[in-house]
């Protein structure tokens, strides 16, 4: 359950949480035609609060909107300022931020341009998923739902409607006794988890699917590649088969909400030793240090609130 806050940002101004409403004729509600982001702020080692990779998240929000011909009625600086204002106004430290670009009402015909584009930024306290422990990790299966491959580029956009497939794949996984699902595409190649990217570790090398597959270009994925290389590991972006996952030494997912999460069981088999692995641990620690402002070389990833 999320803990609601006092204040949100809507269409250019801070307003009360209860004012964050829209009519049932809202276009995005019917067709999923909207774009969003998931961002985190972290309490810093020096006592302050900072937002992790804010600029890159807002760039992605604009790129996602553009891919869907949505014109965001604010500039990047305004949306970035809205993010810091919402965190500050609510006195948040470790928090999750959700900027949302959506098409309003009253027209629910496909000509979305007849309606106003609206923008909201919500934030609420967040310490990570309560059921997804950093050490315990997750228990995953390959999803019977297939990620369309022909539209790999379109999956680079974080569009609301894409998530119908994620929600159904996640539900199917949970109903069949798993906690997470991994999408394969029409070629049977690994893409990503329902809301996270995927890495495997084999013989000390980290491997993650390339951008040519239907994946979101995750910012945690990007941070992990940078941090792992700095730690001295080789990192490869290349195709991964189902079998490679099943025989990996370590497997982990990456995403803003859950950071790095080990996949300890896959299709009922332990991954590697079935325990939290050394490479996953090393990169998890480096990630926390960067996010919490304990790594001077990554200060540029942090926007103080
Ligand atoms: N893939 C999907 C489908 C996602 O929804 C997310 C979460 N935004 C990710 C990957 C991870 O992206 P990021 O690290 O930028 O949160």
Image: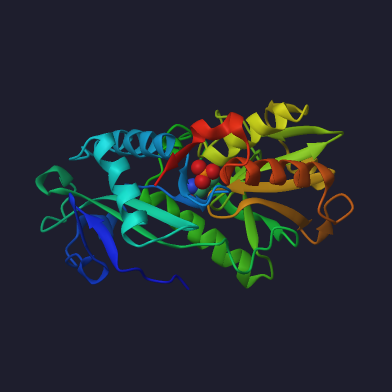
Q: Residue at x 64, y 29 (%)?
A: 226
Q: Residue at x 11, y 55 (%)?
A: 107
Q: With respect to residue 200, does 263 lie above or below?
A: below
Residue that lies at the very extreme toward the right in this rendered image: 273
Viewer can see residue 26: yes
**Res 295 quadrant in image:** top right
Q: Quick check: 281 above or below 295?
A: below
Residue found at x 29% / y 33%: 66
Decide if residue 51 is on the left or right side of residue 63.
right
Looking at the image, which residue is at 37% across and 46% down?
A: 159
89 or 162, which lies in front?
A: 89
Depth check: 122 or 106 in front?
A: 122
What sort of colour scheme is used for the picture? rainbow
Work out whether residue 47 or residue 109 is closer to the camera in this orientation and state it.
47
The answer to whether 270 appears left or right of 227 in the picture is right
Give residue 278's position: percent from left, percent from top. 83, 45
> Can residue 215 be seen in this snapshot?
no
Q: Position of residue 59 (x, y in %)?
A: 37, 33
Indicate the quadrant where residue 287 lies.
top right
Residue 198 placement (x, y as % from top left): 65, 43
- The number of discs equals 0
Q: At which x and y percent is residue 117?
A: 18, 47
């Amino acid at each position: 359950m999320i803990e609601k806050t006092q204040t949100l940002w809507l269409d250019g101004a801070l307003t009360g949480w209860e004012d964050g409403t829209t009519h049932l004729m809202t276009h995005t509600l019917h067709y999923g035609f909207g774009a969003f982001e998931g961002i985190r702020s972290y309490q810093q080692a020096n006592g302050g609060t900072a937002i992790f990779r804010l600029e890159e998240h807002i760039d992605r929000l604009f790129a996602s909107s553009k891919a869907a011909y949505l014109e965001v009625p604010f500039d990047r600086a305004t949306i970035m300022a809205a993010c810091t204002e919402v965190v500050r106004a609510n006195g948040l430290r470790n928090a999750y931020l959700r900027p949302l670009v959506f098409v309003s009402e009253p027209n629910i015909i496909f000509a979305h341009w007849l309606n106003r584009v609206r923008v909201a930024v919500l934030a609420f306290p967040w310490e990570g998923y309560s059921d997804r422990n950093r050490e315990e990790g997750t228990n995953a299966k390959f999803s019977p739902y297939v990620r369309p491959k022909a539209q790999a580029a379109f999956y680079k956009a974080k569009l609301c409607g894409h998530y119908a497939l994620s929600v159904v794949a996640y539900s199917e996984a949970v109903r069949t006794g798993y906690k997470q699902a991994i999408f394969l595409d029409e070629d049977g190649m690994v893409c990503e988890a329902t809301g996270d990217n995927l890495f495997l570790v084999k013989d000390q090398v980290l491997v993650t699917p390339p951008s040519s597959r239907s994946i979101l270009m995750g910012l945690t994925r990007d941070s992990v590649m940078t941090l792992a290389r700095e730690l001295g590991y080789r990192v490869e972006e290349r195709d991964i088969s189902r079998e490679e996952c099943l025989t990996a030494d370590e497997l982990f997912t990456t995403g803003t909400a859950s950071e790095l999460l080990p996949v300890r069981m896959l299709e009922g088999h332990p991954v590697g030793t079935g325990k939290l692995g050394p490479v996953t641990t090393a990169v998890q620690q480096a990630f926390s240090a960067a996010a919490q402002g304990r790594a001077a070389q990554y200060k540029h990833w942090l926007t103080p609130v």
